[in-house]
Amino acid sequence: LDITIMNANGQLKTSIYHKPSADPDYLPHTSDYPHAIHRNIPYTILLRAARLCSNLHDFHLEQLRIDVSLLLNNYAPKLITNQFLLFFQVDKADFLIKRFNK
């Protein structure tokens, strides 16, 4: 699990760790997999970020990183946008607000 854990004044803070040498690769959209697999990747990656980031700032940075990485892997901007909107519509916005307001 690639996660950074920090102790900030007695409170644990978490964020996603990216190795400096790591490429921003996800399953390339041009690979020979069913469309449903490609369609679910943006949603799943964003859900992972929401679960692992302990503050809103880190989550937003990770969301931008995911967006750029998916674009670099030939995902259509419309697909990315639709999956991100789906993520925030399926009760995840409430989950994030409750989690980050603790």
Image (tube, rainbow, N blue to C red):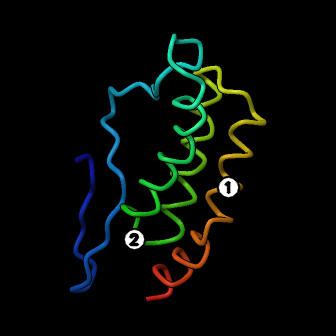
The quadrant the C terminus occupies is bottom left
User: Which amino acid, by three-letter code, is at mark 1?
Assistant: Leu
Q: Please determine whether, in this image, residue 71 is positioned above or below residue 51.
A: above
**Which residue is at 66% across, 51% downward?**
84
* SS category of the residue bearing label 2: loop
User: Which amino acid, by three-letter code, is at mark 2?
Assistant: Ser
Q: Which mark identifies residue 46? A: none
Task: Specify the quadrant of the image occupied by residue 12.
Answer: bottom left
Foreground pick, 38 / 59:
38
Q: Which mark identifies residue 54? A: 2
Q: Position of residue 90 (x, y in %)?
A: 62, 65
The single residue placed furthest to the right in the displayed view is: 78
Task: Specify the quadrant of the image occupied by residue 66.
Answer: top right
> Seen in the image, is 20 located left or right of residue 59?
left
Foreground pick, 52 / 30:
30
* Mark nearer the viewer, 1 or 2: 1
* SS category of the residue bearing label 1: helix
**Crowding at mark 1 (Cα within 10 Å: few <14, some 14-19, many 20+):** few
**Which residue is at 52% across, 76% downward?**
95
**Which residue is at 41% across, 53% downward?**
48
Q: Which mark identifies residue 86? A: 1
Q: Position of residue 17 (x, y in %)?
A: 32, 48
**Crowding at mark 2 (Cα within 10 Å: few <14, some 14-19, many 20+):** many
